[in-house]
Amino acid sequence: MDEIQEKTPAASSVTMSQLVLPPNTNAMGTIFGGTLMSWVDIIATIVAARHARKAVVTASMDSMHFLGPIPLGAFVYLHARVNFVSRTSMEVGVRIESEDPLSGTLEHKATAYTTFVALDENKRPTPVPPLIPQTQEDQRRYEAGKKRRALRRTSENSKKSPQEILSAKMEVIQKLIDHQQKKLFHLAQERIPEITAEDILSGHDFPKLAQDVFFHYEDGYLAGLMAAQMNLRSHERPSN
């Protein structure tokens, strides 16, 4: 089997231009949302296919929020590129801008994130080239796409029972609290060398300076986590 060569986001990026014509508009004289979504699907398909060099199918499109109407006669520019790649799937981000043909004013109108899966000759998912971010912006998009993929997978597992979901949330928050408490301890030690981890965790007999460190630490981020933990605990089922 030939080794799959890595690719950069720029290698498959595409920009598409469209003119909003009368058949594309609604009674208000602005573009149909469905028309814009079809343009998004077309350009994203091209980008995904260019990256994979295989047949691709749309697996999902995240919710697309319109930031403003696009009127009849406007120039529309869709900029699409691969943000993140898994083994057989790719996230393609599409930025939609409109330009006033008379003033030249350019405005961001919407952003969409689509997921595509590459298929082999038997129409089964097949590996795609790994993505190599080249710039800081590429890396930012890659990390953001990775987080969105994790959220999608969480949503796919939403058939879990409410108690299982609650336990998972409790586990995540506890890990965050543990991490923040360690950072708080080191910060407090810089102010009060004799303070101990037990002082931090118990919250009892805090010297006033340590209290100031606790309550002002990262604008109350730790306190917020602990409040969220208490809220989740209030929803736990009592043990039999």
Image (tube, grey):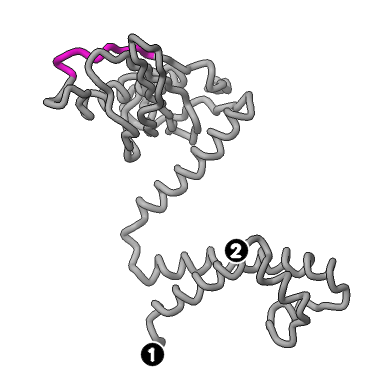
Q: Earlier in the sequence, mark 1 or mark 2?
A: 2
Q: Position of residue 50 (x, y in %)?
A: 43, 16
Q: Which residue is mark 1?
A: 240
Q: Which mark is residue 221?
A: 2
What is the quadrant of residue 37 in the picture? top left
Question: Type of residue at label 2?
Answer: Tyr
The residue shown at (32%, 40%) is 63
20 in the magenta segment: yes
- Most foreground residue, 222 or 11: 222
Q: Would you say residue 25 is visible in this rendering?
A: yes
Asked if residue 179 is positioned above or below residue 30 in the image, the reply reads: below
In this picture, residue 139 sits left or right of residue 208: left
The residue shown at (41%, 53%) is 154
Q: Would you say residue 60 is visible in this rendering?
A: no
For the residues carrying marks 1 and 2, which lies nearer the camera in this image?
A: 2
What is the quadrant of residue 66 in the picture? top left
| Numbered disc 1: secondary structure | loop
The residue shown at (40%, 46%) is 152
In this picture, residue 203 sits left or right of residue 162: right
In this picture, residue 132 sits left or right of residue 22: right
| Numbered disc 2: secondary structure | helix
Q: Position of residue 188 (x, y in %)?
A: 79, 70
- Magenta residues (range): 16-24
Q: For label 1, count other residues whose C-alpha is less than 10 Å away and answer few (under 14), some (14-19) or many (20+).
A: few
Question: Type of residue at label 1?
Answer: Asn
Q: Position of residue 122 (x, y in %)?
A: 32, 26
Q: Kindly give the residue lying farthest to the front in the view shown.
A: 103
Q: CA distance from mark 1 to mark 2?
A: 34 Å
Q: For label 2, count other residues whose C-alpha is less than 10 Å away and answer few (under 14), some (14-19) or many (20+).
A: some
Q: Position of residue 6 (x, y in %)?
A: 58, 23
- Most foreground residue, 155 or 15: 15
